[in-house]
Amino acid sequence: MSKNKDLDEIISKLDMKDFFQKLGVSFKAKKKASCFMCQDPEHLAVDIKTGVWHCHKCKEGGNAITAYAKAHNCSNGDAVKAIKSIVGWVDDTPPPRTNKNTSNKKTDKPQGEPDINNPTEKTSTETNKEPTQRDIAYSKNQLIYQRLVELLHLTDADREHLKKERGFTDSVIDELKFRSAGKYIKNIIESLKTEFTAQELVNSGVMLDVNGTHKVDDQLLQDKIIIPYLDKHGKVIHLRPHKLGFKGIPSQIYGEYFLREKPERIVLTEGEFKATALLS
Ligand SMILES: [Zn+2]
């Protein structure tokens, strides 16, 4: 069976309406749905048979795979893997891990040319390494952390604390997106259940599975400052409540954002706040 045929079959197994709703789309009438890309309330048309979609407002469009990839900010290859797991698809012949180019698969396509019909195909400039389940879980965690930083705020008291006790300036505080933990986060994480599954929230560490019951990690409900870890583009990749850390999530390097301009000198510091002090 060809890869494209597999993909068609995998997509055909999706409950499209449910699939798009999980991406944040709400259906109002035929060809009138809210757009998960631009948030316009009614200019998205989704063919719930094929998964082909197009927004007449932001002009974005594609198929179920590109919808997933765009909504989750992942590659098409990762989207295919995620969709496979949604429909419970198991590959009957796993692709060879090595000697990819010498595999005896029949192809009439010249080597090195991207196949536009097949989003899993990698061009020669891309790495051959396939993303693992762990990579996908990791990018899902990042999406959860990004959403939390969008939804949380920094209290005036915490801002004053960072200025007085740590010597940070307002602009550095805003640039590094510090947030306040506190009881209010409980409702925010409950509301994230419309965007993520309980299991995804547990995997990211913001919720705990206590004997089958999901509860928000107490770390987030305490009077603490939450420190976002930013990548070199300023994107949130990790969160840490000050002096704590989510269960099951390995430690991360804090300073990636600070290295974006390739400084000649690098100073190693004991904690995140000491690193930040260097910027203030
Ligand atoms: Zn749109």
Image (cartoon, grey):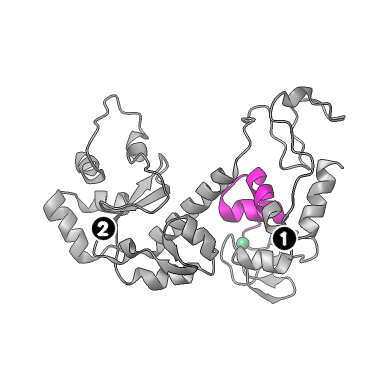
Residue 78 in the image: above or below residue 54: above
What amino acid is at disc 2? Ile
Q: Which element carries disc 1, helix, strand or loop?
A: strand
Residue at the spot of label 2: 225
Q: Nearer the viewer, residue 208 or 145?
A: 208
Q: Is residue 167 visible?
A: yes
> Where does residue 173 sit, x and y in percent of width and height?
25, 52
Vertical side of 280 occupied by 50: above or below:
below
Q: Quadrant of the N terminus?
A: top right
Picture quarter with ligand 1: bottom right
Q: Which residues are magenta?
A: 58-82
Residue 129 painted magenta: no
Q: Please state if 181 lies on the left or on the right of 141 as rendered.
A: left
Q: In front of the other: label 1 or label 2?
A: 2
- Circle 1/circle 2 CB separation < 8 Å: no
Left of 109 or right of it: where is 247? left
Q: Residue furthest left?
A: 164
The vertical placement of 271 against 163, above or below, is above
Question: What kind of residue is marked 1?
Answer: Trp
Label 2 environment density (alpha carbons within 10 Å; few <14, some 14–19, many ≥20): many
